[in-house]
Amino acid sequence: MTMYRSFRVFVSAAAFALAATTVPSNASASPEAEADAVRLSAAGRTLKWNWTPPGQSKPFGHAEAVIGAPLATVRQVVLDFERYPSFASSRFKVARVLKRDAGNTEVYMQFSVLHGLLKLWHVTRFAPPRAAGAGTEIIEGTFVRGNIKDARTSWTLREVDANTTVLKADILLTPDIPAPQSALDEELRDAAQQAVDGVREKSQGHNRQITWARP
């Protein structure tokens, strides 16, 4: 196993049950949100891949899932930065809010790789949620400083109905050491998946995959 497999730093790596729960829809969703929810429900699992978002030059890890909880609940979990270590305590050692200013939040994060032999840290500035269309919010974190080259996080929350949300995560982490891109791509995909699954579990109160159906 290479050291790059240890860059799963943001969230829980626990296995999740495959049982599905159907969530009845009780409000009209946008066509995009419905399409996402139907596609993810049909997949029956969190989907993940790598891509380069518009305006970016490096590939991010991407993951998305449908969550059986209101958007407000999912947002609260995403913004609870100091709870992030509870998702992956073996690697994610510290997440501490340094300051809040004009809606922005600077968070110090420390994590370990190579069974604790190497400690990495960075400070990320999270902007407040911003609207990105009807029923959609984006929460973005940008790199401030640290002993890595770059770190960025983007959460997209899309309301499907009053009790269902689609969550997407895009994660970039660039270590200050040479790293094969294929290894980094794998780690970023896995980190994004673990992030989404961790938020889903906290938001739902259980770790079961849910299924959304059109009314």
Image (tube, rainbow, N blue to C red):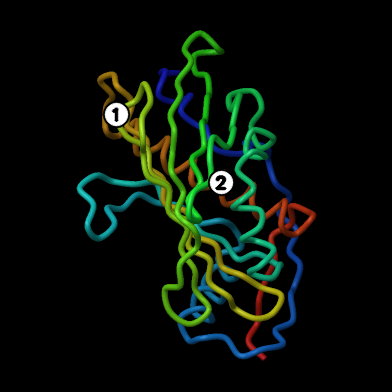
- Which amino acid, mark 1? Lys
Q: Nearer the viewer, residue 26 or 157?
A: 157
Mark 2 and 1 residues: CB-CB less than 8 Å, in contact?
no
Q: Which residue is mark 1?
A: 149
Question: Where is the N terminus found, in terms of image quarters?
Answer: top left
Assign a secondary structure to mark 1.
loop
* Place of residue 162 in the rendered image (x, y in percent of width and height, measured from the top left): 69, 79
- Give the number of marks: 2
Mark before the other along the chain sequence, 2 or 1:
1
Instruction: Write the residue at 34% across / 30% down.
Output: 183
Residue in front for this viewpoint, 161 or 142: 142
109 lies above or below 78: above
Question: x, y (%) of residue 164?
Answer: 66, 73
Seen from this angle, which residue lies furthest top? 117
> Depth-wise, is mark 2 or mark 1 nearer the camera?
1
Q: In the rendered view, would you say 14 is above or below 214?
A: above
- Residue at 49 percent across and 13 percent down: it is 114
User: In the rendered view, does 17 fall on the left or right side of 103?
Assistant: right
Identify the residue under disc 2: 195
At 67% across and 91% down in the image, what residue appears?
Answer: 215
Type of amino acid under label 2: Ala
Q: Dividing the picture into quarters, in which one does residue 38 lie? A: bottom right
Residue at 48% x, 86% y is 31
Q: Secondary structure at mark 2?
A: helix
For the residues labelled 2 and 1, the Cα–Cα distance comes to: 21 Å
In the current view of this chain or complex, which residue is farthest to the front? 102
Instruction: Judge by depth and name the residue closer to the eye, 23 or 118.
Output: 118
User: Mark 2 Cα within 10 Å, few/some/many (few <14, many 20+)?
Assistant: many
